[in-house]
Image: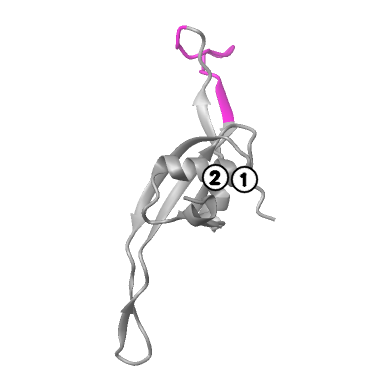
């Protein structure tokens, strides 16, 4: 499949922006895996960016296909892909005419530290 057929759009929603700017806090650990303590005996905390972007993908695309397409299109290294199928919603027009929006696949792509997708 062509990468342009797999990736429909990159959704830059408020939550997506928060995810790309958000930082993850975790305990700094030594080689044995134990938390490193500071002078007061509290564990040292490190921060790193979450680096996640939301992508609308083809409904039949698999995680490896989405990973390869994002890496080809944006020239970044993808570390993780989470996918979910979003059901179409029931919608009504002004009349009693009922309809549905189409179902789609949402993929949350986690990038390697330092990589970034520029949407401008």
Please count the marks in the image: 2
Residue 25 pos. (x, y %): 52, 31
Q: Quadrant for the C terminus, please.
A: bottom right
- Helix, strand or loop at label 1? It is helix
Residue 56 pos. (x, y %): 47, 56
Q: Nearer the viewer, residue 57 or 97?
A: 57
In the image, residue 120 above or below residue 50: below
Q: Which residues are magenta?
A: 32-47
What whole-number distance in Å separates the C-alpha atoms at marks 2 and 1? 6 Å
**Callouts 2 and 1 close, C-beta under 8 Å:** yes
Task: Write the residue at 45% across / 54% down.
Answer: 57
In the image, residue 36 above or below residue 112: above
Image quadrant assignment for residue 38: top right
At label 2, counting other C-alpha atoms closer than 10 Å, the crowd grade (few under 14, some 14-19, many 20 or more) is many
Residue matched to label 2: 70
Task: Write the residue at 62% across / 45% down.
Answer: 74
19 magenta-colored: no
Residue 74 numbered mark, or none: 1
């Amino acid at each position: 499949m062509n990468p342009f057929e797999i990736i429909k759009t990159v959704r830059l929603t408020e939550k997506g922006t928060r995810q790309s700017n958000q930082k993850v806090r975790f305990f700094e650990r030594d080689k044995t895996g134990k938390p490193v303590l500071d002078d007061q005996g509290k564990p040292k905390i490190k921060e790193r960016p979450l680096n996640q972007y939301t992508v609308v993908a083809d409904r039949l695309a698999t995680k490896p296909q989405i990973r390869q397409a994002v890496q080809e299109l944006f020239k970044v290294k993808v570390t993780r892909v989470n996918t979910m199928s979003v059901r179409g919603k029931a919608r009504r027009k002004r009349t009693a005419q009922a309809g549905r929006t189409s179902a789609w696949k949402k993929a949350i792509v986690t990038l390697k530290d330092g990589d970034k997708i520029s949407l401008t």
